[in-house]
C-alpha cells in the first residue's frame, strides 16, 4: 500500500485543481444563446437592452448583470427570471426563450408585443410559475397548451386583443392563484379554478360576454360540468389529507412496535474495552441543551455500544442510539478510521457545530478518546428514510404520497442549503436514503454532512469505489468512475436516486422482481422505461389513482432530470431541484416559513474552493 500514498496525494492535488477550474462554472451556454436570441428578435427603440446586454464577456455570471435578468446564482449563467416590463419593446413573442430552460418567471408586460401567443408555449416555458403578458397587443386565441404549464401560479393576459373562448382546460392549472384576462375580446364560459385562487369579476371585465362563476351563469351546460369538477377536486383533496394523517398515525405505531423488540447483545466490543482507562474523558458540547457528560455516560447510554443499539452503518462509521440516565435520547456516531490530528478534528468540529438548519440533524457535541472520534447528535425517533420505505411490505404500504413528497421537499431544502447557502458550502458526497433521518413529525433531517472530509483519505468513498468495495454503488454518479471527483452535481445525481426510491418504492440496490434484468440498478431500469416511453410503469402501485398522479409523475420527471441527464452539467442544481419539488407540493402548505433565500453570496465561492482543497 505504501507506494500508492504519494500517487494518491498527487491525484488529490490534481483533482482539486481540475475541480476548481471546471466544477465551479456549471453555467449554461444555452441560457446565453437564449438571451442573445431575445435581443436579436426584439425591437428595442429606447435602447433599454443594448446598454447592458453585452455578450463579449463570457465570465461566470456575466449575464446576471443584464437589465431584467435574474439568475439562480450570481456567478452561474443560468436564468431564473426575465423581467422586461415597461420598456417599449416591440415584436413577436420571443421563441428563443426556449433556451432559458430553467427559467421560472417571464414578465413582458406593458410593452408593444404583438402577434399570437405561441401555440406550443408549454414547450417554450416548461417551468414557469409566473407569466405576465399583460398590456401588450397580443392577438388571436389563448392557446390551450397554456394548460400544460403545470407550475403556473400567476397568469396575466389582461389588456391585449385576445379573441375567442378561454380554454376550459385551464382549470387543470391547480396552482393558479392569480388569473386575469380583462380588457380583451373574449367570450363564452370561463374555467373554474381551485378555491384558493383569488380571482374576481374584475379579472374578467371588459370582454365580449364571458359567463360562469363569479360572473353571471352561462345558459349552456358548460358551467354545470365545471362545477362538478370542483366538487370532485375538493373531495380528492380531503381524501389525500385524511390519508396523510392515517399514514402518520400508522407509522408512529409501527415504529414503536419495531423499537420494542430490542434483543440484548452481551458481546462486548474490543474497541470499547480499550477505552476502559479513559471513562472520565469529557464530552465537549456546543450548547447547553444536554447536561455535561463524560465518556462513561455515553458508554452507559449505548449499552457499551452494543450491537442492538446500532441505528445504521455507513461509510463514515456506525450510528448508535443512546438513552441517558434522565431519559434524554441521543445518537452517537463512531467515526470509522479517522486519521486526522486532534487539532484538525477540533477545527472541523468547530465548523460543523455552527452548521445549523431545520433539515439537518443537529450536532450537539463530540468526544475524542485516543484514536476514537465520537459525535453526539440529537435523536431522530423515526429512523432512516431507507428503513421507512423498504423495511417490510407492511410499512411500505403505510407511506402515502403526501408524506413522501414532504420528505423529498424537506431533504432537497437541506441539501440545497448545504450547497448554496451554508458557509462554508458543503458537498455531502454520501447521499442515500440512509442518510436522511426522520424526526417525530417525519420532517427529514440530513445526517453525515461534512463527515467525508474527516475520513482517512485512503478510505474515502472514491478509493473504495475504485477498489470495487463501494457500498452504496446505486447512488454514485457515473462520472465518478472517470473523474474521481466529488462535485455538487454528483450530490444531485445521488439525490435523484433517492427521489426514484420515493416514487417507485424500489430500493436503489436490491434486486426485486421488476429490476431483475438490471441487476437491481434502479437508474438503468428507469432509463429503459424512459426510452420506451413507459415511465408511468415505474410508479409505486400503492400510490396510483389517489388524486396525486400528476404530482407523482412530475416528481419522477425531476428525478429523471437528475439521473438521466447526459452529463453533470445538464443536471439541475440542488437549488433548482428544491424549487421544482416545492412547486409540485404547492397545494399542501407543508412549510412556508424558513424558506431558502435566493443565494446571493458571491463570497462563498472562495470558501467552496478552500473546502475542496481541504478534501
Ligand atoms: C444601441 O443601438 C443603437 C441603434 O440600434 C445604437 O445607436 C447605439 O449606439 C447602441 N448602444 C450601445 C450602447 O451599444
Ligand atoms: C466581465 O464582466 C465582469 C463582471 O461584470 C467584470 O468583472 C470583468 O472585468 C469583465 N471582463 C471583461 C474581459 O470584460
Ligand atoms: C437554442 O440554442 C441552440 C444552440 O444552442 C440553437 O441552435 C437554437 O436555434 C436555439 N433555439 C431557438 C429557438 O433560438
Ligand atoms: C413552436 O412553434 C413554432 C411556430 O409554430 C415553431 O417555429 C417552433 O419550432 C415550435 N417550438 C417547439 C419547441 O416546438
Ligand atoms: C399537453 O401535453 C400533452 C403531453 O405532452 C399533449 O399530449 C397534449 O397535446 C398537450 N395539450 C395541449 C393542449 O397541447
Ligand atoms: C387552500 O388554502 C388553505 C389555507 O391557506 C389550505 O389549507 C388548503 O390546503 C389550500 N388548498 C389548496 C387546494 O391549495
Image: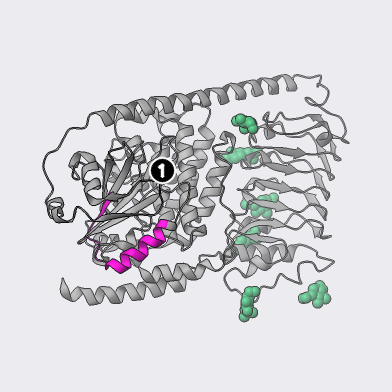
Whether residue 302 is visible = no
Residue in the image at 57% along x and 48% along y? 595
* Residue beneath disc 1: 500
Magenta stretch in the rendered image? 333-353
Q: Nearer the viewer, residue 269 or 96?
A: 269
Residue 577 image offset from top left, x and y in percent: 51, 50
The image quadrant that residue 601 belongs to is bottom right
- In the image, residue 116 lies in the stretch drawn in magenta: no
Q: 158 left or right of 191?
A: right
Q: Does mark 1 have its CB less than 8 Å from ligand 5?
A: no
Could you classify mark 1 by the number of other residues whose Cα lies within 10 Å: few (under 14), some (14-19), or many (20 or more)?
A: many
Of the four image quadrants, the one with ligand 3 is bottom right
| Vertical position of residue 131 compared to residue 208: above or below | below
Residue in the image at 41% along x and 28% along y? 542
Residue 376 image offset from top left, x and y in percent: 32, 50
Quadrant for the N terminus, please.
bottom left
Residue 516 image offset from top left, x and y in percent: 27, 40
- In the image, residue 347 lies in the stretch drawn in magenta: yes
Whether residue 402 is visible = yes
Quadrant for the C terminus, please.
bottom left
Residue in the image at 44% along x and 56% along y? 355
Amino acid at each position: 500500500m505504501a507506494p500508492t500514498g504519494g500517487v494518491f496525494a498527487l491525484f488529490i492535488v490534481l483533482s482539486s485543481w481540475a475541480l476548481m477550474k471546471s466544477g465551479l462554472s456549471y453555467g449554461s451556454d444555452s441560457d446565453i444563446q437564449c438571451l442573445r436570441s431575445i435581443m436579436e428578435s426584439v425591437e428595442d427603440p429606447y435602447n433599454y437592452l443594448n446598454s447592458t446586454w453585452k455578450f463579449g464577456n463570457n465570465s461566470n455570471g456575466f449575464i446576471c448583470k443584464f437589465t431584467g435578468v435574474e439568475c439562480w446564482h450570481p456567478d452561474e449563467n443560468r436564468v431564473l427570471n426575465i423581467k422586461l416590463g415597461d420598456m417599449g419593446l416591440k415584436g413577436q413573442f420571443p421563441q428563443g426563450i426556449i433556451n432559458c430552460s430553467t427559467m421560472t418567471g417571464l414578465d413582458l408586460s406593458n410593452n408593444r408585443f404583438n402577434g399570437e401567443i405561441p401555440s406550443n408555449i408549454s414547450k417554450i416555458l416548461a417551468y414557469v410559475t409566473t407569466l405576465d403578458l399583460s398590456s401588450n397587443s397580443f392577438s388571436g386565441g389563448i392557446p390551450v397548451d397554456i394548460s400544460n404549464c403545470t407550475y403556473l401560479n400567476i397568469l396575466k393576459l389582461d389588456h391585449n386583443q385576445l379573441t375567442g373562448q378561454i380554454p376550459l382546460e385551464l382549470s387543470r392549472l391547480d396552482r393558479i392563484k392569480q388569473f386575469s384576462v380583462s380588457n380583451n375580446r373574449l367570450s363564452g364560459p370561463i374555467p373554474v379554478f381551485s378555491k384558493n385562487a383569488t380571482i374576481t369579476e374584475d379579472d374578467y371585465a371588459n370582454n365580449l360576454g364571458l359567463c360562469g362563476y363569479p360572473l353571471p351563469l352561462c345558459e349552456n351546460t358548460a358551467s354545470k360540468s365545471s362545477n362538478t369538477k370542483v366538487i370532485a377536486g375538493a373531495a380528492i383533496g380531503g381524501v389525500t389529507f385524511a390519508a396523510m394523517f392515517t399514514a402518520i398515525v400508522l407509522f408512529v405505531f409501527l415504529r414503536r412496535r419495531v423499537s420494542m423488540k430490542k434483543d440484548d447483545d452481551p458481546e462486548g466490543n474490543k474497541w470499547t474495552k480499550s477505552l476502559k482507562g479513559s471513562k472520565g474523558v469529557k464530552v465537549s458540547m456546543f450548547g447547553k441543551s444536554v447536561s455535561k457528560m463524560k465518556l462513561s455516560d455515553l458508554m452507559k447510554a449505548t449499552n457499551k455500544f452494543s450491537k442492538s443499539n446500532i441505528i445504521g452503518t455507513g461509510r463514515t462509521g456506525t450510528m448508535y442510539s443512546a438513552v441517558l440516565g434522565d431519559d434524554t435520547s441521543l445518537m452517537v456516531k463512531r467515526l470509522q478510521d479517522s486519521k486526522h490530528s486532534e487539532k484538525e478534528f477540533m477545527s472541523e468540529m468547530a465548523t460543523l457545530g455552527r452548521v445549523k438548519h431545520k433539515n439537518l440533524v443537529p450536532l450537539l457535541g463530540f468526544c475524542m478518546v485516543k484514536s476514537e472520534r465520537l459525535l453526539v447528535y440529537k435523536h431522530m425517533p423515526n429512523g432512516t428514510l431507507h428503513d421507512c420505505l423498504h423495511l417490510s411490505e407492511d410499512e411500505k404500504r403505510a407511506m402515502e404520497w403526501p408524506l413522501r413528497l414532504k420528505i423529498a421537499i424537506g431533504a432537497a431544502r437541506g441539501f440545497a442549503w448545504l450547497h448554496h447557502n451554508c458557509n462554508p458550502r458543503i458537498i455531502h458526497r454520501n447521499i442515500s436514503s440512509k442518510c436522511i433521518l426522520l424526526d417525530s413529525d417525519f420532517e427529514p433531517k440530513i445526517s453525515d454532512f461534512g463527515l467525508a472530509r474527516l475520513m482517512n483519505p485512503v478510505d474515502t468513498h472514491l478509493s473504495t469505489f475504485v477498489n470495487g468495495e463501494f457500498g452504496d454503488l446505486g447512488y454514485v454518479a457515473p462520472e465518478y468512475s472517470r473523474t474521481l471527483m466529488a462535485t455538487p452535481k454528483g450530490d444531485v445525481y445521488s439525490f435523484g436516486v433517492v427521489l426514484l426510491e420515493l416514487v417507485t418504492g424500489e430500493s436503489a440496490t436490491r434486486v426485486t422482481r421488476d429490476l431483475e434484468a438490471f441487476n437491481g440498478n434502479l437508474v438503468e431500469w428507469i432509463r429503459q422505461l424512459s426510452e420506451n416511453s413507459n415511465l408511468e410503469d415505474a410508479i409505486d402501485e400503492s400510490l396510483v389513482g389517489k388524486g396525486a398522479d400528476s404530482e407523482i409523475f412530475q416528481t419522477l420527471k425531476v428525478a429523471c432530470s437528475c439521473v438521466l441527464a447526459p452529463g453533470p452539467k445538464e443536471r439541475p442544481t440542488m437549488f433548482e431541484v428544491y424549487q421544482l419539488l416545492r412547486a409540485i407540493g404547492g397545494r399542501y402548505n407543508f412549510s412556508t416559513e424558513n424558506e431558502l433565500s435566493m443565494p446571493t453570496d458571491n463570497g462563498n465561492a472562495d470558501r467552496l474552493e478552500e473546502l475542496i482543497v481541504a478534501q
